[in-house]
Amino acid sequence: MSARNPGMHLDLEWVSKVRVNTQAVLKRAQQIQGCKVAKKQWQAAWLLKAVTCIDLTTLAGDDTPSNVHRLCMKATQPIRHDLLKSMDMHDKGITTAAVCVYPSRVADAVKSLKAANSSLPVASGKTFDIAALKIRFIPSSDIFPERVQPHCLTSRSLFLILFASVATGFPAGQTPLKTRLVEVQMAVEDGAKEIDIVINRTLALTGQWAALYDEIRQFREACGDAHMKTILAVGELGTFTNVYKASLVSMMAGSDFIKTSTGKETVNGTYPVAIVMVRAIRDYFLRTGYKVGFKPAGGIRTAQESVVWLTLMKEELGDEWLNPHLFRLGASSLLADIERQIYHYVTGRYPAYHELPMA
């Protein structure tokens, strides 16, 4: 895994020079969406890769210890065991990347995942190889796996289901700064290893980039060793230029990931917005040498959408970003459709509702 982004001094000159070509962004997004769709075993490989990048999320007002427990159990075994066995993937330790909950539910998630570690066959923290994810691609303009070698082991990856929590006045980010900092500290103390903070959009919309930088920097310090994912709430930033500037300032302040949305906005992460954000990530990497992750969230519900997001990452940032250390999918209902498509690949038919476990 690459070194953690330490941030840098705020470079307002760099920020002030940002200009985004809207038509070029829209054209590029159309190109990404127009790439060929993988089928059969190639599609299955893509979908298993997507599973390992999911932040399985519940952020509802009626969250209880029981549904958080159910979420955690699903995270430890996201695809039905017999389906994975038929693909020779049952012993590879496939899990989601993390579970994401409200700060008040972090302790419940920690308790559930610790219990899963001691009792379930798929243990968090197990070292494994994802054989079916050895994919070689033909030219980058045509995202389509050329070959999958299901029994050829490639590189080893350590997968650990992490405890993630939203904080800082999620989703609006309008509570006092002191309160938001306390939220972060409490979530970390309760065991959260990743904190999804949300920016104060007022600062971005009014061009107060120095104030935004200072706030995010304080959140980073409050996170300590916990990794920080910064939510931009792009649907409320108005322009692509604001999205790019907010991305840049967030990375300068030390964000480990930048994230599109809370999932509560009217407009969530779209492919054009993602193009702007990942271009900012690329520019920041070229300037500093530090890799920052990307997390789209909000409205990602279908297996096909997850493949498009993976395609976008490969095309714009390359293979190094196709792993959960640098790419996440924030979703609550996506996993159900991926499992449904895996079922179809294995059996040749789609499942009845009672044939897949409750998520």
Image (cartoon, rainbow, N blue to C red):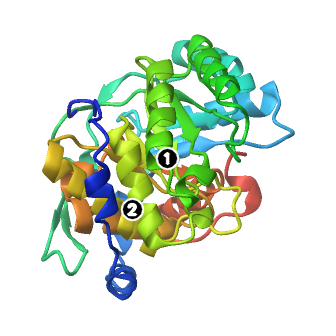
Residue to which mark 2 is pinned: 244
Q: How many marks?
A: 2
Q: Give the CA separation, mark 1 to mark 2.
A: 24 Å
Instruction: Say which quarter of the image contains residue 70.
Output: top right
Name the residue that disc number 1 marks: 54
Q: Is the Cβ of the residue at disc 1 closer than 8 Å to that at disc 2?
A: no
Q: Secondary structure at mark 1?
A: strand
**Residue 151 in picture, x, y percent from top left:** 20, 47
In the rendered structure, which amino acid carries the disc numbered 1? Ile
* Front-most of residues 94 and 265: 265
Q: Amino acid at mark 2?
A: Tyr
Q: Residue at x 51, y 65 (%)?
A: 303
Q: Which quarter of the picture shows residue 269?
A: bottom right
Q: Nearer the viewer, residue 315 or 236?
A: 236
The image shows residue 50 at horizontal and vertical percentages of 42, 54
In the rendered image, which quarter contains the C terminus? top right
Q: Secondary structure at mark 2?
A: helix
Mark 2 nearby-residue class (10 Å; few <14, some 14–19, many ≥20): many
